[in-house]
Image (spheres, rainbow, N blue to C red):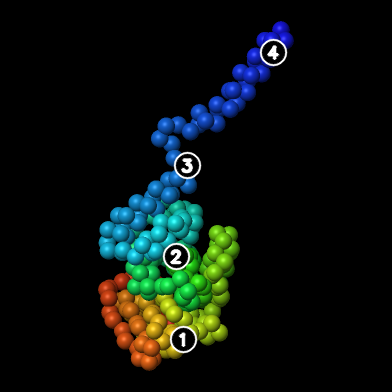
C-alpha cells in the first residue's frame, strides 16, 4: 500500500503540472502576444507602407502599447488606423498621423520637446522614446491627470506634464528644439513661435472645425527667421483655451 500511495502522489503532481499547459491550446495567443502582433502589423501596413521610413520612429511605434492609452472599451480597436474617443470630446490621433508628425519633427536624442495637447499621452510617449525630455501641456484637468498617472505607471521618467492653456506654451522650459501641437489652432500661436529655439521645428494643424485644416511645418533658422510649409489636409479636435477656443 505504501508503494501505491507514493505512485498516486506522483501521478497527482504530474496532473497538476499538466493542467495549466493544457489550457495553452495550439494557436492560442496571450493578450500581450496578440497586441504585439497587432502593433507590428499596424506599423508595416499602416505606417511603413505609407512612406514613414525613419527607423527610430518605426521602432517607437512598434514598442509603445497604444492599447494602454485608450479607454478599455476601445482596446480591440487600438491598432486600427483611425482616431478613437478618449472622453470629454477628445480623441487619440490615428497611428499614421502620430508617426507622420513625429517624423516631420525629426527629433534628436538630446532634444527638449514641447507638446501642446497631451490628450491620452500617446504622442508624448512616442516622442519620449526619441528625445531627452518631453514637456506636455493639457488644458483639461481630467485628461491631464489621467495621462500623468499613465506616464508614471508605464515608467516614462522623461515626460513632465502640467495642466495649463497650451496656447501659451511652457515658458519656464523654453526654448524648445521641437514643438508638436496635437489640436487644431485657428492661427499659429505667437508664444509658441517665440519659444521655438533657432534651428527648431514646429508641427501644427491649423484651421477651425468648419473648414479644411492643414498640417503645417514651421522651421526657425539660426538667425531667427521663421518659414512655414503647408503639407496636407487633416482633421483634429480644436485647440481650446482663452485664445485657442473655437
Q: How far apart are labels 3 and 2 at the CA level?
A: 24 Å
Q: Residue at x 68, y 15 (%)?
A: 6
Q: Is residue 101 left or right of residue 174?
A: left
Q: Nearer the viewer, mark 3 or mark 2?
A: 2
| Image quarter of the C terminus | bottom left
Residue 82, percent from left and from top: 35, 60
Q: Secondary structure at mark 4?
A: helix
For the point 48% across and 33% down, which residue is it?
24
First of labels 3, 4 by sequence position: 4
Spatial CA distance of label 2 from label 4 is 59 Å
> Can you identify the residue that label 3 sits on?
30
Checking the image for residue 126, the label placed there is 2
**On residue 195, which mark appears?**
1
Q: Residues within 10 Å of mark 1 (few under 14, many from 20)?
A: many
Mark positioned earlier in the residue sequence (1 or 4): 4
Q: CA distance from mark 2 to mark 1?
A: 22 Å
The local crowd at label 4, few if under 14, some if 14 to 19, many if 20 or more residues have their Cα within 10 Å, is few
Circle nearer the N terminus (2, 1): 2
Give SS at disc 2.
helix
Quadrant of the image for the N terminus? top right
Whether tag 3 and tag 2 are in contact, CB under 8 A, the answer is no
State the mark number for residue 5.
4
The total of numbered circles placed on residues is 4
Element carrying mark 1: helix
| Mark with earlier residue (3, 2) | 3
Amino acid at each position: 500500500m505504501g508503494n501505491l500511495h507514493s505512485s498516486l502522489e506522483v501521478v497527482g503532481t504530474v496532473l497538476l503540472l499538466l493542467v495549466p499547459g493544457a489550457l495553452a491550446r495550439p494557436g492560442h495567443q496571450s493578450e500581450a502576444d496578440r497586441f504585439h502582433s497587432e502593433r507590428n502589423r499596424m506599423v508595416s501596413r499602416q505606417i511603413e507602407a505609407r512612406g514613414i521610413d525613419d527607423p527610430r520612429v518605426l521602432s517607437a511605434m512598434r514598442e509603445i502599447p497604444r492599447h494602454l492609452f485608450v479607454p478599455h472599451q476601445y482596446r480591440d480597436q487600438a491598432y486600427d488606423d483611425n482616431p478613437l474617443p478618449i472622453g470629454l470630446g477628445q480623441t487619440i490621433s490615428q497611428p499614421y498621423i502620430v508617426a507622420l508628425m513625429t517624423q516631420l519633427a525629426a527629433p534628436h536624442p538630446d532634444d527638449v520637446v514641447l507638446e501642446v495637447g497631451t490628450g491620452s499621452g500617446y504622442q508624448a510617449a512616442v516622442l519620449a522614446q526619441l528625445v531627452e525630455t518631453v514637456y506636455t501641456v493639457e488644458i483639461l484637468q481630467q485628461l491631464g491627470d489621467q495621462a500623468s498617472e499613465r506616464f508614471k505607471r508605464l515608467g516614462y521618467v522623461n515626460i513632465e506634464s502640467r495642466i495649463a492653456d497650451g496656447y501659451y506654451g511652457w515658458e519656464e522650459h523654453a526654448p524648445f528644439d521641437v514643438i508638436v501641437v496635437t489640436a487644431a489652432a485657428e492661427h499659429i500661436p505667437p508664444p509658441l513661435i517665440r519659444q521655438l529655439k533657432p534651428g527648431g521645428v514646429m508641427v501644427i494643424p491649423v484651421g477651425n472645425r468648419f473648414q479644411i485644416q492643414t498640417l503645417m511645418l514651421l522651421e526657425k533658422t539660426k538667425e531667427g527667421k521663421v518659414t512655414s510649409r503647408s503639407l496636407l489636409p487633416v482633421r483634429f479636435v480644436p485647440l481650446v483655451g482663452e485664445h485657442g477656443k473655437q
